[in-house]
Image (spheres, rainbow, N blue to C red):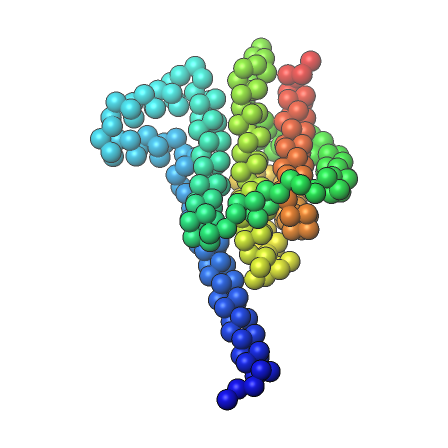
Amino acid sequence: MLNLEEMHLISASRLRRDNLTGDRRQVVVVLVISALSLTFLNFGTTNPAWFVAMLEMLGAGGWAERARDAFERSDSAQLNRLLFWGGGQILAYTLLPVAAIKLILKDSIGNYGLRIKGTGSHGGTYAVLLALSVPFVVLASFTAAFQAKYPFYDLAPGEGLWPGMALWWVVYGLQFVALEFFFRGFMVHGLSKRFGYLSVFVMMVPYNMLHYSKPVAEALAAILGGVILGSLSLRSRSIWWGVGVHVGVAATMDVAALAHKGFLW
């Protein structure tokens, strides 16, 4: 017969083993879903040509031709392509992660960085981070590579900010919400049960790779930015201040680029 102490040790061992198995399962789910989401992001959901080709493959030739007109021949073709890109980004960053959280992990989405209550005390840290970032963005805006890349919406001579640029900025901002949820929410908080603080560095690698098509200074800054925003999200349990920083930096980049190109005066 086992005494009470031995039974307690056996129960504790089983509990640790069960928790370990659950943590490992969650790591597998989060990493596989992340890989699938980033694959769809790269090869499909943001590519208008892929969308047109898929419509043709499905036998929807008429819809394919309408889509081709919208993306290539319409007066608003540039805006249409950008809105498709933004919508695809949002879809890729949220659809599979949310489905995995609810259907596979059986968890609350709020546990993945969407908490609002109690996050007000962290605002000062993010404000300092934004204030430190702005001078570097302004300095980088004087380079040819920066001005060739930003803003994504290329205003025509004499074109105002409304409605094209304004509509694009709304979708662009929502895309940052989805991006922060994916990297600093789903990946960081989804992996933290197993890896703790190291989950930030696991997330940082694909986040850095996301910037390879951008100027090299921005790609290098993404390493530091990813670690800082990931660390703050882990500490505050929330992505929302990070969204604010990301949107603030992106807005500064666009405004600086527009200023250099003479669209603001």
Residue at 56% across / 86% down in the picture?
3
In the picture as drawn, the residue positioned furthest to the left comes out as: 59
Vertical side of 72 occupied by 200: above or below: below
Please identify the quarter of the rendering in which residue 75 is found.
top left
**Residue drawn at (64%, 22%) of the image:** 258
The answer to whether 85 appears left or right of 265 in the picture is: left
Front residue (pair 148, 255): 255
Q: Residue furthest top?
A: 158
x, y percentage for residue 167? 53, 21
Residue drawn at x 25%, y 34% is: 57
Total of numbered circles in the picture?
0
Quadrant of image for the C terminus: top right
Q: Is residue 139 left or right of residue 88?
A: right
Residue 36 lies, in percent from the top left, at: 42, 48
Relative to the observer, which residue lies in front, 129 or 142? 129
Quarter of the image holding residue 145?
top right
Residue at image position (46%, 53%) is 105
Instruction: Find residue 35 and report its horizontal and vertical position in percent.
Output: 45, 51
Quadrant in which residue 4 is drawn: bottom right
Q: Position of residue 123 (x, y in %)?
A: 74, 39
Q: Is residue 209 visible?
A: no
* Of residues 183 and 50, the one drawn nearer to the viewer in this rendering: 183
Residue 43 visible somewhere in the drawing:
yes
